[in-house]
Amino acid sequence: MATAADENTDLSQYKHRRHELSYSKLDEFRKGDTVWDVTLKSPDGIEIHAHKCVLASQSEYFESMFIRGFKEATQDVIQINDISSDVLKKVIDFMYTGELVTIEEDNVEEMLNAADMLQMEDIRNECVKYYMCMVHDINCLEFKETADLRAMTTLSEICLNYALQRFLHIAEHKSFLKADVTHIIQLIKSDDLHVTKEEPVYEAIIKWVKYDAEKRKHLLPDLLANVRLVFTSKDFLVEEVISHPLISSNKECLNIVNKVIVHFNYKYGDSLSKIIKNVKPRKHTTRLTMDEMRRLRHYNCSDSPGRPERGPIDLSDYFKDFDLNHHFPQIEWNQYMNEDNFHTRFSEPWRGINEGTTDDDEESVD
């Protein structure tokens, strides 16, 4: 004797089977040209028979058309202008069978267009899965543009994170040169951009602008403002940046670069307005080199003339002496650098640096 649990299980299976049989029989009717109540006509004139009740149950687009009083509700033939006959047939087949053609490069865009138009979330999700599996250096920014235009949040985030990780590789491809400026800025302004130095970031934006200089050169100030030039060297700024025709011919760009050079040339007694504030290294910026440590100490930890020799220095307290905002970083400060590096007595070698470059230091100090 069957238990109640067995009966419930059988009923569940029976209901599922009846559901499959119903759609299967309806599919058989429409393909056999016997029972159907609507014809969908594609742009090339191909006709596809279907049932309004099935279309309305599977697509919000058709539900609105047939249930909410649109004129198509009383028509036997409906023109579908924005979906090719091949894709339309595949979508209608999916409504009846639940089996979707394989999403691939040749059809993904058309399938996505159809899914968006007909408001079929399941097909849209399959297209998104395809894009997610196919992201690589050449197409990630193109995919991101598609994702942003179609509000595919997850795909957009995946493409962005991929591009942040692979920026230097992506910048080598021609596809990078065709990327939208909003995506370029989104990348280069991020702390998560996976670069150890800023020089390649500068070189990438110059290459992007040069690709179509007449139309893009006005964008260079906004791009350059997001390159963290304080983490380049003074030599690089003077020899490579400020002398570049695109930079030297642009007043806004010159102002950006000159401000960094003034920052580099900061000396004790100068106005603190020369210090560039609130600029921090990216998460993957390399730790400061020895000459950068010397420069940082020289600019910001110099002994004041006439004051007794200082003991170990807490850099944050030193900043507070000058009434600076307490948040780090305010100047060239690396988050991976241990502050203990600055807890050192000002010995004669440091005084030598304060008084001028020594022979030993000449090659390593900018």
Image (cartoon, rainbow, N blue to C red):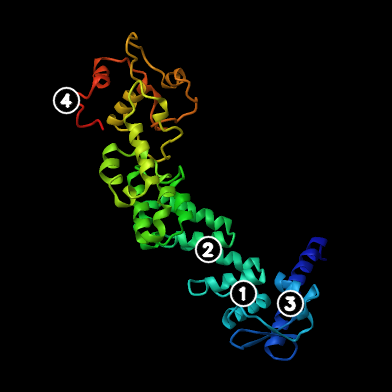
Which disc is residue 99 wearing? 1
Residue 190: percent from the left, percent from the top?
Answer: 46, 45
Residue position for label 4: 359
Q: Secondary structure at mark 1?
A: loop
Which of the two discs, 2 and 4, labels the residue nearer the N terminus?
2
What's the residue at 26%, 33% (across, down)?
A: 366
Count how many numbered circles sit on residues in the image: 4
Left or right: 277 in relation to 44: left
Amino acid type of the residue tagged 1 in the rendering: Glu
Q: Relative to 4, does residue 53 appear above or below in the rendering?
A: below
Q: Quadrant of the N terminus?
A: bottom right
Where's residue 198, x and y in %?
A: 35, 43
Q: Position of residue 129 (x, y in %)?
A: 54, 63
Residue in the picture at 56% in, 75% down: 101
Outermost residue to the left = 359
Amino acid type, mark 2: Thr
Where, by quadrant of the figure, is residue 300 drawn?
A: top left
